[in-house]
Image: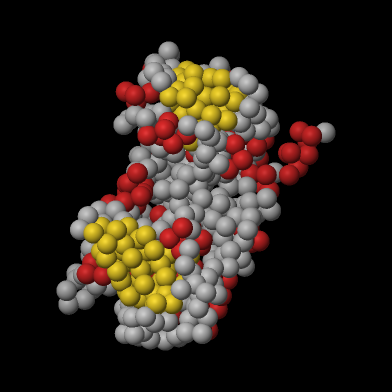
Amino acid sequence: MNQTHPVVVIGAGPVGLAAAAHLLERNQDVRVLEAGPTAGATMLSWGHIKLFSTWRYNIDAAARRLLETPTDTYAGQWDAPRETRLPTGAEMVSDYLEPLANHPALAPKISYGQRVTHVTRIQPDGKGVDKTNSKQRPDSLFLVRTATDAGAQEFIARAVIDASGTWNQPNPVGRSGIDAIGEAEARDAGFITSPLPDPLNADAQHFAGKTILVLGAGHSAANTLISLGRLRQKHPTTTILWGLRGTANPVRLYGGGAADELPARGQLGTSLRRFVDNGDIRILENVAITSLETGHRLTVNLADATSIDVDFLVPATGFRPDLSILSELRLDMDQIVEAPRQLGPLIDPEFHSCGTVTAHGERVLAHPDPNFYIVGMKSYGRAPTFLMATGYEQVRSIAAALAGDRAAADQVELELPETGVCSTDLGGSCDLPASADTAASSCGSPETSADSCCGAPEPITIGFATGTLHGHTELLSEKKS
């Protein structure tokens, strides 16, 4: 492989910086291109949310070694957060990603304000290699074009690792996977919020006393609904509507409760159900949005010829990968989940939860265009089963392959609890203040420590359901019988 040019990593989030750390550890030149102004810029968009996984599963091994190893220009005095604590998105940035990005070995390798617009191939002499050209493709390099405040820039790379994520590509609120008529206008007018608003802090003033429709049935919907329920306790004129695209199956909505192998996740459903049973949240079934009309309020028109007037619509509908920047590459993608073809069957949410996705590495993530890889959340396409630790193992394997260590690249391993620890699975055993109906919980006891789960509101979710169905098929059978 041509060693003259660097490996370009797209995105300075946890997986992108982990890729850079592994490449540096193997003495590979790397250039990280980040669209935002800082490392972890996307995480700061939901900085108020806690991850469900503890610090133990959110720090990459090569990144840890880089941060803890003293050099002539670096003291190596980084203090790793307590492994058993649950970080917020903001803490992930301040306590881990910022120190990592500022490390003297890595900081000169990162360019901020670089939004990648195209990735294509180019001959070593600078001549073009379009998608239909096969003869000169194996020996070609990559051309990565970015948009910046100063205009377009181009980078030449010997390999590209796309760790740009999916946060900026939310699924539409319209039916059947496409925008509802008027959806773009509703977003521009501010009626459609971010997927994870902050009803108890930054958005409290906007939401208090308003009518809010939360669309979606995953954990990010639960996160927002519980926060809105707590907001309504302070502002009773707030109206909360929970829009479901199907019927209200209690197990799918609330999980297994006490039967859940992850108690925090079970308590999440229990807390949410309490708000519904108390009448704080009203469920709307079979919500298929055909069009949106913007005016003084937002009119939501449905397929059954009814309509709803709301002040805000929260799109807790998941995300999908933006593959448009890769249109000039030869990709081999699964047509269902839009992941690399070999990975698709391993992560299909109809058959897998996050706990049943096996470790996978460079061979599974490879494409017909050699030395190009999609990793992290984006590699999972539309599947909601991504694990942060899985992303770290992806880039470890890829870095080994790019350094010529085939044996290490093929030896993929991942040690997780039996149920999986999902960076997208938020739950919370203490997500509500102690009350009479939680008296049985230790969360209400005076000796609760600040470092326990009850010291602060626990995480709910950063965005997706994580396969409750697969852990509780017996409960579903009971409901059907």
Q: What colour-coding does the image apply?
A: secondary structure
Q: Residue at x 68, y 30 (%)?
A: 247
Quarter of the rendering occupied by the N terminus: bottom left
Q: Is residue 352 left or right of residue 379?
A: right
Quadrant housing the C terminus: top right
Residue 236: where, in percent of width, then height?
A: 43, 14
What is the quadrant of residue 151 in the picture? bottom left
Asked whether 386 or 30 is in front, the reply is: 30
In the rendered view, does 46 fall on the left or right side of 474? Answer: left
Residue placed furthest toward the left: 73
At 27% across and 65% down in the image, what residue appears? 153
Tally of numbered discs: 0
Residue 37 horizontal/vertical position (percent): 25, 53
Residue drawn at x 47%, y 24% as measured from the top left: 293
192 relative position to 281: left or right: left
Q: Is residue 320 left or right of residue 106?
A: right
| Residue 169 in the image: above or below residue 216 | below
Seen from this angle, which residue lies furthest right?
A: 481
**Is 416 located above or below residue 195 in the figure?**
below
Instruction: Return the residue nearer the eye: 267 or 377.
Output: 377
- Can residue 447 be seen here? The reply is no
Can residue 301 be seen?
Answer: yes
- Between 441 and 290, the residue placed more toward the observer is 290
Q: Quadrant of residue 294?
A: top left
Q: Position of residue 14 (x, y in %)?
A: 38, 59
Q: Please state the horizontal and vertical placement of residue 179, each as a whole percent of the image.
A: 52, 39
Q: Which of the 4 quarters of the picture holds residue 246?
A: top right
> Residue visible at 29% across and 58% down?
147
